[in-house]
Amino acid sequence: MAVPNRATLIVLKLKAIWDRNNRISQRKSYGIEWESGKLAKDYADILALIDPNNGGNDVEISVLGKF
């Protein structure tokens, strides 16, 4: 299985955060508590991906231009 690079994962997590925030704020979520928990995890995942002590300096910014 191919694993996406950090930049791709960051973009996907940002999209998930945007979607979840939108569903929560528009009250379109069927499980606001569950969605809020997933939102907190998405934020934590972003922090982990950009952590300079854990490979965060290796984000290939040039990949982001393709999105």
Image (spheres, rainbow, N blue to C red):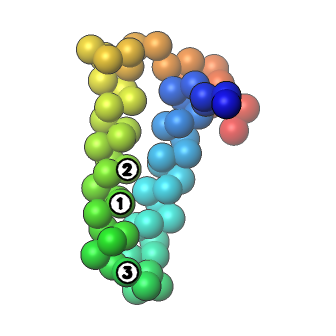
Who's the residue at 29% across and 43% down the image? 44
Label number found at residue 38:
1
Res 3 quadrant in image = top right
Q: CA distance from mark 1 to mark 3?
A: 11 Å
- Amino acid type at mark 2: Asp
Quarter of the figure that contains the C terminus:
top right
Q: Pointer 2 and pointer 1: residues touching (CB < 8 Å)?
A: yes
> What residue is rendered at 37% in x and 81% in y?
31
Of residues 38 and 27, the one nearer the viewer is 38
Label 1 neighbourhood size at 10 Å, few (<14), some (14-19), many (20+)? some
- Which residue is labeled 2 in the image? 42
Mark 2 residue element: helix
Q: Residue at x 38, y 15 (%)?
A: 55
- Amino acid under label 1? Lys
Residue 31, numbered circle: 3
Tag on residue 23?
A: none
